[in-house]
Amino acid sequence: MRSGPVTLLLSAFLCATGCSDSGGEGETGGAGATSGTAGTTGGTGGATGVTSGVTSGTGGATGVTSGVTSGTGGATSVASGSGGAGGGTGGAGGAEARVPAASASTMREAGEKANPPILIGAAISGSGLNDNGYKSVAAAEHNYVTAENEMKWNAVEPNAGQFSWGAADNIVNWAVSNRMQVKGHTLVWHNQLPGWASSLSGAAQVEQAMRRHIEGVMGHFKDRVHTWDVVNEAVLTDSDTGVGNPRMRPSVFFNALGEGFLDLAFEIAREQDPTAKLYYNDYSIDALNEKADFVYEMVKGMVERGVPIDGVGFQMHIGPPNNEAGGADVAANLRRFSDLGLEVLISEMDINRCSNQVTAEEQLAYYHDIVEACFQLPKCVGITFWGINDGRSWLNGWSGALCNGQSSQSLLFTDQYQKKETYNKVLDALLGR
Ligand code: 9MR
């Protein structure tokens, strides 16, 4: 963790900052591919794998663990999987690839027409909703909303037991009126806590406050919000890139309740809403590194204990000070988490170009290949970008991002809401190109 006079301010931001699929062992399915090397598309026959099969198509095949759809047309595999269309209904079988829309003029349309559909999200700020250009791009291009700050603990429960819904309701109601889903962000997090919550101590006090908060917030939004980041950023490493001594992060929750605070938070959330999707969310776990391994084991333990977790959000803040993650590694990482039976999602994507640590060409490749990695995995249910236009990016104003007052150039739209080349790369990936 960082220290110094600006520690508090920095650590407020620090938080965040932050398969080869062999084609499975395809089982049945005519002449379909089983294992494959360079993923192919199309084909006949088909097979789905035991844990991570690939294709879609018309042939028959069954897998074993978690299959999804059938479709037509072969699928592209992610890192090395098989193609071969053919595959089957899958039943409960291996994951088959998502089938892209034949065409679409917006990301939202591409996501809605894909089979299975994929949510296309954006972090939305209250101030952005005062800007008509922002609003119209946000609603045309996305169907999933995360409030950038307005649903955090300090915003909705600034005083113990006294809730304040105005700013959050504003965003949620705008989203609902534009037929967008909302992900509640975030119930239990060490950051953006009001002073009274940060100074709680003792298991009983902390549990009582956590329970009241989860119940109060989920209860208020119950009819409008059906997916939640229940716990955010509970794991820490020495470096923001996810390397070095991964461990549970000290926090008011961990300090009072130990690692069990995670199980407890998810159990309270499940009691409050039996059908909501409940996610763990973190940064710099996007590819294969020590932090991702630690979170994998943590989440695997939760699944094995029967803790009601539905999925994991991979924030995908790429570039300084966080990790960089190539498409193939992201694909492999998402795949291993989804093989636990969980949904996965890209939850806060941006790619920081400040300091030129990431070049323009690298940024385009990252946007395309990382979106593709999620798109090709049916259990990757959504991709959320952390903002709409470059000028409003949180990165611009944070010293850790090395922008020195410059724009981070991290998103998909210019300040005049023109599509950037990054947008085109994302749309390509959503259309299977
Ligand atoms: O984008 C958010 C920024 O406006 C806030 O100042 C910051 C404070 O912590 O939080 C930012 O959002 C974070 C998100 O809630 C959790 N993951 C990391 C995000 C970027 O820091």
Image: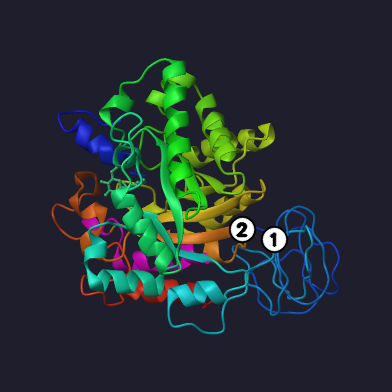
Check if mark 1's residue and mark 2's residue have beta carbons within 8 Å.
Answer: yes
Which residue corresponds to the image point at 30% horizontal and 38% vertical from the top-left?
154
Q: Which residue is mark 1?
A: 95
Image position of 373 (left or right of 137): right
Res. 252 visible in picture? yes
Q: Is mark 1 within 8 Å of ligand 1?
A: no
Checking the image for residue 379, the label placed there is: 2
Q: Earlier in the sequence, mark 1 or mark 2?
A: 1
Amino acid residing under circle 1: Ala
Res. 246 visible in picture? no
- Up/down of 119 relative to 307, above or below: below
Amino acid residing under circle 2: Lys
Q: CA distance from mark 1 to mark 2?
A: 8 Å
Which residue corresponds to the image point at 51% horizontal and 55% vertical from the top-left?
345
357 is within the stretch colored magenta: yes
* Whole-percent x, y for residue 164 in the image: 31, 42
Q: Is mark 2 within 8 Å of ligand 1?
A: no
The span shown in magenta is 353-372
Q: Secondary structure at mark 2?
A: loop
376 is within the stretch colored magenta: no
- Up/down of 130 relative to 75, above or below: above
* Whole-percent x, y for residue 412 in the image: 33, 69
* Whole-percent x, y for residue 57 in the image: 74, 76
Q: Look at the magenta stretch and give its main secondary structure.
A: helix
